Image (cartoon, grey):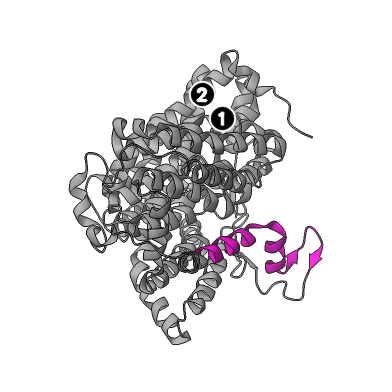
Amino acid sequence: MVWSQIYDPMNNAVLSTALAALPVVVLLGGLAFFRLSAHVAALLGLASALIIAIFVYGMPAQMASASALYGAFFGLLPIGWIVLNIIFLYQLTKDKGYFKILQDSIAGITEDRRLQLLLIAFAFGAFFEGAAGFGTPVAVTGAILIALGFSPLAASGLSLIANTAPVAYGALGTPIIALSAVTGLDLLQLSAMVGRQLPFFSLLVPFWLIWAFAGWRGMREIWPAILVTGVSFAIPQFLISNYHGPWLVDVGAAIISMACLTLFLRVWKPKTIWKSTALKGHEADSGTVDQGAAAMLQVVKHDRATVFRAWVPWLMLSVFVFLWGVPQVKTLLNGGDAKAKIEYAWMGVTKIDIPVPGLNDMVEKVPPVVAKAHTEKAVYSLNWLSATGSGILLAALLAGLYMRYSLGELLRKYWETIKLVKFSLLTIAAMLAIGFTTRYSGTDATMGLAFAHTGALYPFFGTLLGWLGVALTGSDTASNVLFGGLQKITSEQLGLNPNLMAAANSSGGVMGKMIDAQSIVVASTATRWYGHEGDILRYVFFHSIVLAMLVGGLVMLQAYVYPFTLLQIMPVAP
């Protein structure tokens, strides 16, 4: 029997919205105020989500349980699979001393911690966001920063702040492709519109990142380098998104930004070298630097051959992550594509689509959330070979052999890594279970509809809706799927450009990436600061909400104020 969602079960919009938000309040409140362990807070949030779904929204208990299990499995693959294998690679390089050499090589470009942040957290992280997404950049950059001697709070929080502007084009443009699919809007038009919003923040975020780390004075001292980093990312981001499409925006912009900053640092040096690795105003945190800050901050000069060997594992990772993100490679690894009528002998083996019993085509979304009522698909794709984490695992194994680990040592190290991240995997599974439960029960739509009652202020609050979607689901793609249709319908009812508001959902969503529980757990795991998720959340929340409001302000200008309105009608390349 098909169950139709209800968006105001209490016949009182305010009360229904408050109840719909309860799982989020329990989750974030447990982390931020009661200092619960992340897995405990996530499990409590999941319990409250199931209670609200079943007893308030009337969702059949079997469906609610199925949606939670669906989310939990999705949390383990692809997301948990990425985290597990990137930490495995990190452990391999650390134990062989390769990470220390990598640290020294980066310090060889510059010993200044602020400039290292620009290179690693912003530019290098953007490359991984563009190639893989789904937590990969935070896992990689967090691990690198902690090994460089950054304090755990700095490594975690700054990785999250830096991983914002590239998110809308993550995983080779997946969020924009999904947004186009659910709204029916032109893909290139959406790509271009997002590319007329985010470059402003690609320029701002590097300044914001260094200000958050070193304060106003510390930021002002290196403003030329920050400007080079931001401009060399923002301009390619605009050009590629408007005149090519969403696929290679982050990858291309990140490579150009890294190259420009590296070349600039050959001719420009800051007057003072910033060597503190703790956040400005959080100096006490520096005492918790992993492996001892004093030892980690000793820079040793290495010959080029040694440095190259240390970079080889990470070059392998970059190649594998990029290849695993190429659509043609994914099709090959999956055994083909039925829609494209491509089929290989291993089709149905490396990718198995499993309709979720009792949930697939059993939940009906109804107006006003969608234009026409339709049932929701719930098909779990067991793409064990084409998943990004599998590419990372293969890169790690090859890197391990390159570093002369035996097969027995690799197996033992992998088991140690599983034990290291076991609670993180449980937390990620529970977080995604919450997200899928709210999606299929309709509680997320209730919160979305509350934003839609803001009239002329909708461009601002509609942008914050995208922020909320990513904060809830942990994914700009999921937020676009969740609220893309609502953005289109509402904007058309209010006489706004649907391309503008659909794009605003994705652009606003990027600022929610730093506070979603999944990203925070990935950051705490990568920096081996598990149990301090509440500290990370409290630190990044201010940055997240203020930046989201700034995006909303820009969208308001684009909606109503000349000459910003011209950004809506600029032509795109055919």
Give the quarter of the image for residue 208.
top left
Q: Which quarter shows the C terminus?
A: top right
Q: Is residue 317 magenta?
A: yes
Q: Is residue 432 left or right of residue 211?
A: right
Q: Is residue 260 left or right of residue 302?
A: right
- Residue at which label 1 appears: 197
Identify which residue, 267 or 213, lies in the foreground.
267
Q: Earlier in the sequence, mark 2 or mark 1?
A: 1
Considering the numbered disc 2 on the image, is that residue within a helix, a strand or a loop? helix
Which residues are the magenta region? 314-343
Q: Which quarter shows the N terminus?
A: bottom right
**Residue 130 point in image, percent of width and height:** 57, 49
- Residue located at (49% from left, 65% from top): 81
Evaluate if marks 2 and 1 touch, with contact meaning CB atoms under 8 Å apart: yes
**Residue 346 point in image, percent of width and height:** 72, 75
Identify which residue, 151 or 225, lies in the foreground.
225
Main secondary structure along the magenta-highlighted residues: helix
For residue 548, which numbered disc appears in the image? none
- Residue at which label 2 appears: 554
